[in-house]
Amino acid sequence: MELLQLRYFERVAAHESLTLAAKELHITQPALSNAIIRLEQELGVKLFDRTGRTLKLNAQGVYMLSKVQKILS
C-alpha cells in the first residue's frame, strides 16, 4: 500500500466518482480505477459498492476513509 493510493482513495471517496477524482488528480480514469482496485486487492475488501458507473462507499470504505483522513492530516 502506498501513500499515493491512499490519496487517490480519499479523492474518489470524496467525489464518489472516478471521473471527477481523476480530473482533480490530473491522471487518467483507468489509472485511477486500477489504483483503487489494487488497493482493494491488497486490503482484501471492497471499499465501494459499484452499480453500473456509480460508486458508493460501503461500510469498509467508510471505516478506511476515517483512517486515511487521519494518516493524510
Image (cartoon, rainbow, N blue to C red):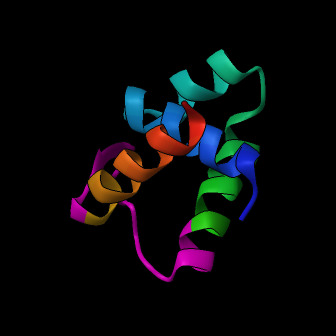
Q: Give the side of residue 28 with respect to residue 17, left or right.
A: right
Q: How far from the left and from the top, in percent, is residue 60? A: 30, 65
* Residue 51 appears in the rendering: no
Q: Give the side of residue 53 with respect to residue 9, left or right.
A: left
Q: How far from the left and from the top, in percent, is residue 9? A: 54, 45
Tell me if residue 22 comes above or below residue 10 in the rendering.
above
Q: Give the side of residue 66 with respect to residue 5, left or right.
A: left
| Residue at position x 70%, y 23% in the image | 25
Q: How far from the left and from the top, in percent, is residue 4? A: 74, 44
Residue 18 included in the magenta stretch of the image: no
Front residue (pair 30, 26): 26
Q: Give the side of residue 37 with respect to residue 51, left or right.
A: right
Q: How many marks do you count on the picture?
A: 0
| Residue at position x 76%, y 57% in the image | 2
Q: Which stretch is magenta?
A: 40-59
Q: How far from the left and from the top, in percent, is residue 20? A: 52, 22
| Residue at position x 65%, y 18% in the image | 23
| Residue at position x 59%, y 77% in the image | 41
Residue 58 included in the magenta stretch of the image: yes
Tell me if residue 18 comes above or below residue 55 in the rendering.
above
